[in-house]
Each structure stands twice: as C-alpha cells, then as structure tokens.
Image (spheres, rainbow, N blue to C red):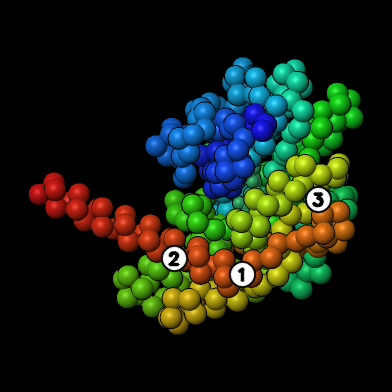
Amino acid sequence: MQKIVVTGAGGFIAGHLVKELLKKGHKVRAVDIKPLNEWYQLSPEADNLVLDLRLRENCYKAVNGYNEVFNLAADMGGMGFIENNKAACMISVLINTHLLIASRDCGISRFFYASSACVYNGEKQTDPNNPGLKESDAYPALAEDGYGWEKLFSERMCRHFMEDFGLTARVARFHNVYGPFGTYDGGREKAPAAICRKVIESTITGNKEIVIWGDGHQTRSFMYIDDCIKGILDIMYSDIIEPINLGSSEMVSINELVDIVEEIAGVKLVRKYDPDAPKGVRGRNSENTLIKKYLGWEPSIPLRTGMKKTYDWIKDQMLHSTESKKSKSRFNK
Ligand code: NAD
C-alpha cells in the first residue's frame, strides 16, 4: 500500500484515478481547487482537500507525509477553452513547478505528470490523414499556443528534476480522453461530450439541426477513460523516463464521430458547419509503437463502445438536471 496524492481530483480523469487507487487498497489524498460539492466524483474514503496548487505553500500541504504524486491538476478544457484562455492555461505552470519543488523537498518517491498531445509540432498536424504522432514529433518545438507550450515546458521540468535532483518522474502525453463523469457543457467540454450533448438536446427539443465546429473533416483519436486509467498506472510504475503517448490510434473525423453518436441516438440531423469556431489542428493521431514496445499494450476499448457509455451517462445527467429544474420550479410555485 502506498500513500498517494492525486491532484485535479475534482475533475474528470483524476476523479476516476482516485477511485481506482482506492480500489487497489492505497491511501489516497485527493486535491482540487474546486469546492467539494463541485467535484465530478467524490470518494469519502479519500482525504479530500480543497487547495489552490498554484501556491507553493499549498503544494507542501498537499504532498507532506505522502509517497507518490499524480499531478493532473490544470486549468484546461477543450478547443473552445484553450484557444480563448491561453494565459490561464500557461499559469498552470505554477501548479507543476510548485508541486515538483514540494515533492523534491518532501521525499516523494514517484511523480506522474499528465501532459498532452498539444505539445506536438503544429506543422506535423496539417493533414487530416495524419499517420500518427511519434514522441519525437514534439521537436523542433511548435506546440499549441498557450496550453501546449505550458505542457511542453512542464514536461522538461520533470525531466530536469529527475536529472538534477533524482526525483523519479513519469510523463504521459494524453490524446483526447472521454467517458462518463467528464465535462459536457459550460465551455470546457471536448468534442465527444459536446457532440453527445448536442444530439441529446436535439432529441429533447425536436430541433433537427446540429452545429459542427469547422468543416467536420478534421481528425482526432479518442481514448476511453478506463484505458486511460490503466495506461496512467502502467506508465507510472514503468521504467520509461521519456514522455510517452497515451492515446488511441483509432483516428476518425469529427463527421465520423457525429455519425457514431447519431447512430447511438437513432437520429439523423442536418449538419451546419461553423468555419469560425475553434477547430485546433487539422489532423492528429497517436502513434503507439513505443507504448506497445515498452508495456505490450495500447488502448483497447473501441470508440463505438466507449461513446455509447458516454452518451448514456450524459443523457442521464441531462434528463436528471431537467427533472430537478422542473421539480424546483414546481416547488417554487
Ligand atoms: P479537468 O478539467 O476535468 O480536471 C482538472 C482539474 O484540475 C479540475 O477539477 C480543476 O478544478 C483542477 N485545477 C485547476 N486549477 C487548479 C489549481 N490551481 N489547484 C488545484 N486544482 C486545480 O480535466 P481532465 O480532462 O480530467 O484532465 C486532467 C489532466 O489531463 C490535465 O492536466 C489535462 O491537461 C490533461 N489532459 C487531458 C486530456 C483530456 O482529453 N481530458 C488530454 C490531454 C491532457
């Protein structure tokens, strides 16, 4: 049993990670800046702390007395958020910097950092038929402005804390992660959740139109949350010292993703394309040679299967929130 700190635990991926670590019998301290009632998943068995980890003293409070750290805290969201909040994304550098310093000073034995496919050079992502981004494609550096540069800088800080201070650090570059208990509205949601929400809205309202950002031909790959959690743990306890891709290599266009959700919902919608909306790079996919070689593994849950689970969860949330709004308005009358 280890004593493990998970940051960003009120969010999507880290909320699932806390649950998995508790299931494995670890003692877990879960930390997030959000008030507890806003956490997507709250595990009462964990030591749940509300702390702003941009502040150095809070990072000491977070890690003191524990052995390992998974750092997933970041001010982030989908394309709509990161294209319009570059400074906020870059300020997350304080979280990683102060957590690394506190981890070094408090004798943390292993440190995990959640990086992103947004570190990759934009010039290698101009073709929708992207053959897959190899780890070496992050250099020469031309990362996604704001968010991607912060991730790349923080990756390198992990590397130098390992080289200069002997802190064991592991870095995974996540490619889009999706699944239940993630953001699906409010402006920080990513494409899979946003498309599910829009299709569900159309089934509720009867409006048969869907707005798609860009021309729908841009490509991505999407990794289901269960695959992501397994990958995080495998990478954390491996000997892999370089940043490594953690993503699916099942690349689809956004139009194909909409096809999948329409098929799940049993509807066909009229597509309206918004060329001015944030679109990100033209083509992105994960190249998984290294993770297969080192860990003998890559994500396994097919997109259709994961999207069905995600769709069902979002639909349930939306129907519940409609119900609770209705019952509140009945109560108020
Ligand atoms: P999320 O937004 O659901 O979770 C991040 C959490 O960090 C949030 O709950 C937020 O409140 C918390 N946080 C932000 N600022 C903080 C602060 N100052 N102190 C403490 N907590 C703070 O995002 P997620 O999708 O779960 O992503 C987790 C990590 O994985 C992030 O580092 C993200 O950049 C990275 N990542 C995610 C994806 C993806 O597809 N979801 C892709 C690439 C990388």
Instruction: Say if 96 sits above or below 24 in the image.
Output: above
The location of residue 9, given as percent across then percent down, is 55, 38
Amino acid under label 3?
Answer: Ile
- What SS does tag 3 mark? strand
Q: Amino acid at mark 1?
A: Leu
Name the image quarter holding residue 206: bottom left
Q: Earlier in the sequence, mark 2 or mark 3?
A: 3
Tell whether label 3 touches label 2 (CB within 8 Å): no
Disc 2 under 8 Å from ligand 1? The reply is no
The kind of residue on which mark 2 rests is Asp
- Quarter containing the N terminus: top right
Q: Residue at label 2?
A: 312
Question: In the rendered image of this protein, does residue 232 appear above or below residue 56?
Answer: below
Residue assigned mark 3:
244
Q: Give the left or right position of residue 146, taking residue 317 as reference.
A: right
Q: Residue furthest left?
A: 333
